[in-house]
Image (cartoon, coloured by chain):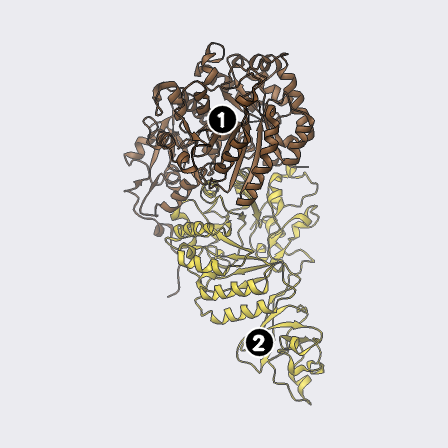
Chain colours: A brown, B yellow
């Protein structure tokens, strides 16, 4: 019998008994709630929709039903749940875990000529023997670094001011590169420096060795110099001059800047952002202060309420969007990270907002004295006398001892948001992370207490704010947001027609 | 019918379509035969053995005519064999024309019908191997309606055609029917392509359903050509709607699983969406589905409907004037493009697209069925425009118009 065309009804099935796939929900405002599935796909829907879904009250012929089914919130007899596809999407989102520890931070020296208000660790000292990393420590630490299974590693020089121990950088770079070649791994090298003591010779070395520069810039001179005192009160002038020289010699794409928000900064989001634009940066990270080290001690000068930071952040973000609409390319990095989690199927590699936390399993710190810490914050805590997050020492312990230490297992165990109280049923779980070191410092307990956690408060509000922005999604805003996410100019993301 | 449409519908003067078949009278063979066209004598016996003499003159004047694989001539048999013994060579004589057959073309000579079908033209970018006529789907708008026929012979024809292609084409398509139904035959084709045409970009059109089976995909990938792209159609983000368009229950799930299975091998895959009345309403949701579930796709092609094959009996279900879906098309293209997906618009004349979509429009229609309409005369962007399918004479947008200045869209739309 010849085949005949069948009507659409022939391909339907029983939808009266739809079944649910895992999803979470949260009220966005009085009118709307956000539904998020296991792979981080979301739907903004009117308040009460989640209840309707659970009570099997959704009309199977509605657009909403088709969306819920296509985005794997539910399935019915008309189709399989495609669990393998959901699993693949979930695995892709978690692929930051592949390869284990990828970022290896070396504290070349603890010495620094700055005495920044928020700095946790640095020492103003001429005692090189006491505060500089030794070549023996370097060799041992490199041994550990190249035991990491990751096919691509990043080495970051930190301090103190690492350029005060430039000899060590020159000692270490060729050795790290030789090991990368031996082990067949890729290697990026970054130096985190305030650029105050940088010379053209150093910059030429960075250019020749393909080393990227990450510097600090807190805003215009009156903020930067207030936050970052040094003899001569010229930190800003030296940083700007350093940035310009570095761009000339090493290349603009190899120079990045980070800002830290202090109490003083809170009143000047526009001025700080405009300073970044004026200096030609294409991105800015509106970063809250870390509550560690000297930052805790000097809290009266630098600390502030989370609510004030959020106000600062929202004002800044709004200003950046205005700049973007006027054709000026500038991305806000924290929003970029979270929007990448919300709007793309991709994984992010930001170690401070992931589950399990990046401490030790994504990033590790080799301190000047050979101590190994799970994160920068862990060694700051240690400088205050609490060595809870010290995983071992390169001279005493081997790779297995350090990376299977009870400390590291404890940190990781306590930072799986999928199982943390207050996080396990949170709709923003897929976009958030855990910070066991922060919660330990604040609450004396790695799990922490969500209702009073500044980390939770800040991230919940930032994510909610981004959802509110997305809810008014228009064509222009999508182009801006994907220019951020893809690190492209808006013109590259959607070329305007050349008539 | 709208008078404007009727006017536009007639063929523009000077349009000439490329001929892919001619007929003559067969003698001396019982099975289809594949050969490379020789319009001039081949230099040695080895090349002669794979070539067909193609001439308007007397083939017996060719030195060593008996060594050639076949003879195709427009002369009647009586005109050249009256006083000379015929070589024991397959012959098609009294061919209507051999003018279109250039040296290097690969042809198939069919015994009973006397058809001479061109399956490869060295000067074209639009060469396809027609893998099989069978299909496990039954798409409402199929341009090549399936036939349940034994395809063993077709595999042999294609294998031989691959051996005869020279110089190696820069690109070559595989189409059908559903090529994966060949199974071992397809693996053989892939192996031959890999051995003979390693530098050629291969594009295979398939519904992708068979790739849902891990053992099939494993065997396929073991044979697959290194420069292969697999083009797979997807019509909805929801199974019942996709299954309805392809007239096969379960097809959506298989296709999605197949795409994911291919992605595990890092096989390049292209998603193809034919735009019609059934696919337009959920086009934006489909774009979202593609980005979230198939972000590995190397290309997404959004394609205008070709009014041929099954589209004709189903036209009332399918036809929507492209002018009427530009909002949906724009939103889907923009959604994918700003996310960095490689997206193209196929089979749409520029005059129906808003000008910021022109950068995505490709000249996608195969040369042998590509034409321009009378309305295109005087159009200033014809050189950049992909024009129409041959079948557009029958049905096309009521909003076609010549574009006189680069920015004329604003004055017309």
Tell me how many marks there are.
Answer: 2
Q: Nearer the viewer, residue B43 or B255?
A: B43
- Is residue A71 shown left or right of residue B2? left
x and y percentages locating residue A9 in the rendered image:
35, 50
Q: Tell me the quadrant of the picture where the N terminus of chain A can be found.
A: bottom left
Please name the residue that numbered disc 2 is placed on.
Answer: B114
Please name the residue that numbered disc 1 is placed on.
Answer: A369
Tag nearer the camera, 2 or 1: 1
x and y percentages locating residue B305 in the rendered image:
53, 51
Image disc number at residue A271: none
Mark 2 vs mark 1: same chain? no
Vertical placement of residue B206 versus A143, above or below: below
Vertical placement of residue B67 versus B399, above or below: below
Q: Nearer the viewer, residue B87 or A203?
A: A203
Q: Residue at x 60, y 37 (%)?
A: A174
Query: Would residue B132 be visible to someone looking at this image?
Result: no
- Is residue A373 shown left or right of residue A322? left
Q: Nearer the viewer, residue B200 or A137?
A: A137
């Amino acid at each position: 019998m010849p085949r005949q065309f069948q009507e659409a009804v022939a391909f339907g099935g029983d939808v009266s008994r739809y079944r649910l796939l895992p999803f979470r929900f949260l009220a966005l405002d009085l009118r709307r709630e956000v539904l998020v599935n296991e792979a981080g796909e979301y739907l903004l829907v009117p308040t009460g929709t989640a209840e309707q879904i659970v009570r099997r009250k959704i009309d199977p012929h509605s657009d909403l039903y088709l969306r819920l089914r296509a985005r794997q919130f539910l399935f019915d007899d008309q189709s399989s749940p495609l669990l393998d596809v959901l699993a693949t999407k979930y695995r892709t989102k978690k692929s930051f875990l592949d390869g284990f520890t990828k970022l290896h931070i070396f504290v070349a020296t603890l010495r620094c000529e700055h005495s920044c208000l928020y700095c946790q660790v640095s020492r103003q000292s001429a005692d090189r023997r006491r505060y500089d990393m030794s070549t023996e420590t370097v060799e041992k630490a490199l041994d550990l670094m190249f035991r990491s299974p990751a096919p691509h590693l990043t080495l970051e020089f930190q301090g103190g001011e690492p350029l005060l121990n430039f000899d060590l950088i020159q000692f270490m770079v060729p050795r790290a590169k030789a090991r990368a070649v031996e082990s067949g791994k890729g290697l990026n090298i970054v130096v985190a420096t305030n650029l105050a003591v940088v010379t053209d010779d150093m910059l030429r070395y960075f250019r020749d060795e393909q080393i990227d520069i990450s510097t600090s810039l807190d805003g215009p001179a009156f903020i930067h110099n207030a936050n970052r005192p040094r003899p001569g009160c010229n930190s800003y002038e030296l940083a700007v001059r350093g940035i310009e020289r570095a761009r000339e010699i090493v290349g603009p794409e190899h120079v990045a800047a980070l800002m830290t928000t202090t109490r003083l900064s809170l009143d000047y989001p526009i001025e700080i952002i405009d300073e970044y634009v004026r200096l030609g940066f294409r991105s800015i990270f509106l970063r809250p202060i870390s509550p560690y080290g000297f930052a805790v001690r000097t809290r009266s000068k630098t600390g502030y309420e989370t609510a004030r930071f959020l106000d600062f952040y929202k004002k800044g973000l709004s200003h950046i969007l205005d700049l973007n609409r006027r054709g000026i390319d500038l991305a806000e990095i924290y929003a970029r990270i979270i929007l990448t989690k919300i709007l793309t199927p991709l994984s992010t590699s930001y170690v401070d907002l992931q589950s399990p936390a990046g401490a030790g399993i994504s990033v590790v710190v080799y301190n000047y004295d050979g101590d190994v810490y799970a994160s920068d914050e862990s060694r700051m805590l240690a400088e205050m006398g609490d060595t809870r997050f010290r995983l071992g020492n390169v001279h005493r312990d081997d790779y297995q001892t350090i990376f299977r230490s009870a400390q590291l297992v404890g940190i990781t165990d306590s930072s799986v948001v999928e199982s943390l109280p207050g996080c396990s049923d949170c709709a923003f779980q897929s976009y958030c992370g855990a910070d066991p070191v922060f919660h330990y410092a604040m609450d004396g307990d790695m799990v922490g207490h969500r209702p009073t956690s500044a980390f939770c408060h800040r991230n919940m509000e930032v994510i909610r704010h981004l959802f509110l922005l997305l809810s008014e999604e228009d064509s222009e805003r999508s182009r801006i947001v994907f220019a951020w996410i893809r690190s492209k100019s808006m013109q590259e993301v959607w070329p305007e027609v050349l008539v | 019918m709208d008078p404007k449409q009727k006017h536009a519908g007639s063929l523009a003067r000077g349009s000439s379509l490329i001929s892919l078949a001619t007929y003559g009278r067969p003698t001396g063979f019982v099975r289809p035969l594949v050969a490379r066209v020789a319009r001039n004598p081949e230099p040695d016996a080895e090349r002669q053995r794979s070539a067909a003499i193609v001439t308007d003159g007397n083939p017996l004047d060719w030195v060593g005519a008996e060594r050639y694989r076949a003879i195709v001539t427009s002369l009647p048999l009586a005109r050249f064999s009256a006083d000379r013994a015929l070589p024991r060579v397959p012959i098609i004589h009294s061919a209507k024309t051999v003018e279109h057959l250039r040296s290097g073309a690969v042809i198939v000579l069919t015994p009973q019908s006397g058809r001479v079908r061109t399956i490869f033209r060295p000067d074209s970018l639009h060469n396809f191997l027609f893998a099989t006529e069978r299909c496990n789907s039954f798409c409402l708008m199929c341009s090549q309606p399936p036939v349940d026929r034994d395809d063993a012979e077709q595999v042999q024809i294609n294998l031989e055609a691959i051996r005869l292609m020279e110089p190696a084409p820069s690109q070559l398509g595989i189409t059908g029917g559903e090529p994966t139904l060949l199974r071992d035959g397809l693996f053989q084709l892939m192996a031959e392509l890999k051995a003979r045409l390693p530098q050629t970009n291969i594009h295979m059109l398939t519904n992708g359903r068979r790739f849902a089976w891990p053992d099939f995909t494993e065997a396929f990938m073991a044979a697959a050509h290194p420069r292969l792209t697999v083009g797979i159609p997807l019509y909805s983000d929801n199974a019942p709607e996709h299954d309805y368009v392809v007239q096969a229950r379960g097809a959506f799930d298989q296709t999605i699983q197949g795409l994911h299975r291919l992605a595990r091998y890092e096989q390049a895959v292209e998603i193809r969406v034919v735009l019609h009345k059934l696919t337009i309403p959920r086009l934006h949701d489909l774009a979202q589905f593609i980005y979230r579930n198939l972000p590995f796709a190397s290309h997404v092609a959004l394609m205008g409907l070709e009014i041929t094959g099954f589209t004709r009996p189903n036209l009332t279900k399918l036809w929507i004037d492209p002018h009427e879906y530009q909002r949906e098309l724009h939103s889907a293209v923009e959604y994918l493009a700003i996310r960095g997906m490689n997206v193209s618009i196929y089979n749409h004349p520029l005059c129906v697209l808003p000008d910021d979509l022109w950068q995505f429009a490709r000249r996608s229609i195969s040369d042998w069925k590509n034409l321009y309409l009378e309305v295109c005369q005087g159009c200033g962007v014809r050189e950049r425009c992909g024009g129409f399918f041959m079948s557009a004479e029958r049905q096309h947008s009521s909003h076609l118009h010549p574009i006189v200045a680069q920015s004329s869209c604003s004055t017309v739309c």
